[in-house]
Image (cartoon, rainbow, N blue to C red):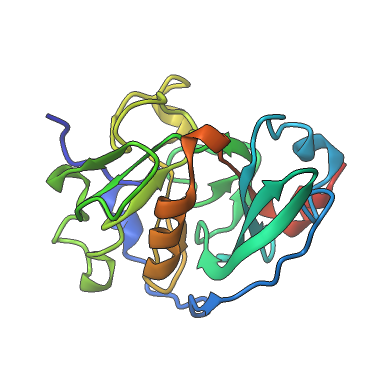
Amino acid sequence: MLTPLTACGSSPQGQQDDTKAGGATNRKAPTADLKRIPDVGDRLYAQIPGNSRQVVAVYGVGKDSADSTVVLYTKHGATWDTTGSWKAHNGRKGWTTDHHEDDKRSPVGVFTLTDAGGALADPGALLPYTQSASIQAPRYWSKPYWHDFDYVIAIDYNRVKGTAPNDPTRPLGQSKGGSIWLHMDHGSGTSACVSLPKSAMQLLLRTLDPKQHPVVVMGDKATLRAA
C-alpha cells in the first residue's frame, strides 16, 4: 500500500501559502479551428508527440507569477479546437526550466498525462484512476487545502508511467522533485502543481483519453513562445 505523499514536490508545510492570486473561475471558450497550439514556439511545439490529439496548455502569466490560464485543445483532422478554458494557479514562485525539490516553481515543458486518481471515487475518468485515502491531503494542513487532491491527474515529470499518482519512485532522483499534478484549486499558488476548479478537473478526467495520447504543455508565456 502506498504511504501518504505530498504532491507538488514539496514538504507538507509548502502547502500553507495563504496569498490569494486571482480567482479560479470557469470560462467557456469558442471553437477556434487552429492550425497549431497558440503561443507555443517551435522548440516546445516539436516536443508534442505526433499522435497526440489532446493538449492541456498551461499559460503562466509571468516567470515569477502564480497565476495562469489552462486551455484544453482537441485535434480534429488537421486543426485544433479550443474546448475549454479556465483560470488556474501554478507554483507560488512561478516557473523554472530546471525544477528542484521545494523550489516552489512549476517545471516548464511538455509532459505526457497517463494516470489519474484522487481521494474521491472515480468520476468517470478515461485515464486509469486510483482512488486511495493515501492521496488525500493531510488534515494537519490548513482547511482550505483539504480538498486539493480530491481529483488529480499526474503530470509525467520524474515519475513512472502506469503507476498511481502518488507512487514515490523518482527516476531522476529525489532532488529533481516529483508528484507534480493537475489538481483541485484552493485559490492561490501551489508548491509546483497546476490547480484548477473542480468542474475543470471533472471535465478533464472525463475527456482526456489514453487513446488520444494527451499531453500538457506548461510554462510562463514568454518561455512558451521562445523559439
Q: Judge by depth and name the residue closer to the eye, 38 or 181.
A: 38
- Answer with left or right where residue 23 lies relative to residue 122: right
Residue furthest front as drawn: 77
Residue furthest top as drawn: 171
Q: Judge by depth and name the residue closer to the eye, 183 or 15.
A: 183
Check the image and report above or below for 126 versus 164. below
Q: Judge by depth and name the residue closer to the eye, 142 or 129.
A: 129
Viewport quadrant of the C terminus = top right
Could you say where residue 206 lies in the image, as x and y percent from the top left? 41, 53
Seen at 49% across and 80% down, the residue is 23
- Answer with left or right where residue 221 lies relative to residue 99: right
Check the image and report above or below for 153 versus 16. above
Could you say where residue 74 lies in the image, as x and y percent from the top left? 64, 51
Task: Tell me the quarter of the picture where residue 215 sits.
Answer: top right
- Answer with left or right where residue 196 lies relative to residue 111: left
Q: Is residue 107 visible?
A: yes
Task: Tell me the quarter of the picture where residue 117 sits.
Answer: top left
Q: How many marks?
A: 0
Seen at 28% across and 30% down, the residue is 167
Task: Tell me the quarter of the picture where residue 138 sits.
Answer: bottom left
Check the image and report above or below for 176 versus 33. above
Could you say where residue 8 lies in the image, as x and y percent from the top left? 40, 47
Q: Judge by depth and name the residue closer to the eye, 222 or 98.
A: 222
Viewport quadrant of the N terminus = top left
Seen at 26% across and 58% down, the residue is 150
Seen at 79% across and 58% down, the residue is 33
- Answer with left or right where residue 109 lies relative to residue 16: right
Q: Is residue 197 visible?
A: no
Could you say where residue 37 lies in the image, as x and y percent from the top left? 76, 51
